Image: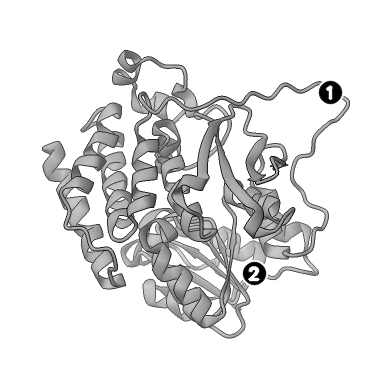
Amino acid sequence: MEVVDSLPQRLNVLALTAHQSCQELVAQACRFRPRWAIATDGSSAQRADWSRLPDQTQLLVGIDGLRQVVTHPDVDVVVAAIVGSAGLTGAWHAVQSGKTLALANKETLVMAGPLVMAEAARCGATILPIDSEHSAVFQALQAGRREDLRRVVLTASGGPFREFTRQQLDQVTVDQALNHPTWLMGPKITVDSATMMNKALEIIEARWLFGLDPDQIQVVIHPQSVIHSLVEFRDGSVVAQLSPPDMKLPIQYALTYPERVECPSDKFDWTEAFTWDLSPPDEQRFPALTLGHEVARLGGTSGAVLNAANEAAVEAFLAGQIRFTDIVPACRAVLEHHHFDPSPSLDELWKLDAWARREITTWTGI
């Protein structure tokens, strides 16, 4: 919203969506006067007070409203920022309609990367990453020829527990896991950062988004979250994208690509001294990274199963039903016990999504 506010002659909000945050949706609609406001959760919509909704804003309720809007011919760009597997539906319909998809929802490609990328090619859709790491890779790749690429290096803050021992990790509380040292995010993504499952999902996303061999993707720990990712070419040159940790920049870059214009994001003060650290991750303490590389190699149904299992396991942790260190082993157990299909349909992926969530409940004994 701040990005749109800063470029009123260039960007116009045609639609806003929410799931249960209906009053926030009303407040945003009052500010931006969109043509549509979509509340995807019917029960929340029934309880909400829509009396302040602007006269020119039409209220749509349910997932069908989302489908109607993202496929509308007046919509140029769809910002896909719904958390989790729930974001796949809107993203899929946007791609099928040949839209520009500004993708913040990594689960879309984790679940259905090959299907989504093939559909984008078939329908002439453009996918531009909003995730800070993938936006950085996208920008850095423009410094050289694709055939000269050696590897992509994704940076990770390491979360709040990067220096914890295994014994300390066993005692992690929900409040500790939700206290991210750099970014302000929702609870699910914050826990994913703490387990480093977010980086595992980003490995899988990068594999499909950029058409990489899984062995071309590495991760380094960078606590300051200033170097957002790096690209190495075969001559040894490494190109990185840097900026203060502020999501407005990658959001705006996706909305204005290929142009660069003034942005309301934070800027560096080059009169100050900086020290930036980079170190390899410890996959013994954070086994989610190993899982991410394995799933990136496997493809097929494995991404959808891992994602669903993780969403269910994080929910169980936040509810106090399992320990922090149970999350990744639970995901691995579910992944290893599913019936792998190398070329699934979208319907099969949704069935496995539901199965994996039930399986986590069985595994954890909830």
Find disc 1 in the rendering and name its residue.
272
Q: Amino acid at mark 2?
A: Val
Residue beneath disc 2: 13
Within the image, what quadrant is residue 47 found in?
A: bottom left
Residue at the outermost right position: 271
Determine whether 283 is above or below 164 in the image. Answer: below
Q: Badge 1, how many Cα within 10 Å: few under 14, some, many 20+?
A: few
Determine the CA span between mark 1 and mark 2: 38 Å
Taking the view exactly as shown, the residue that stands out farthest to the front is 235
The residue shown at (35%, 64%) is: 41
In terms of depth relative to the viewer, which is nearer, 333 or 47? Answer: 333
Q: Is residue 138 left or right of residue 46?
A: right
Q: Amino acid at mark 1?
A: Glu
The location of residue 195, given as percent across then percent down, is 39, 32
Q: Work out whether residue 323 or residue 294 is closer to the camera in this orientation and state it.
A: 294
Quadrant including the N terminus: bottom right
Q: Residue at x 51, y 60 (%)?
A: 211
* Secondary structure under the numbered disc 2 in the rendered image: loop
> Residue 230, position in %: x, y?
64, 42
**Element type where label 1 sits in the image:** loop
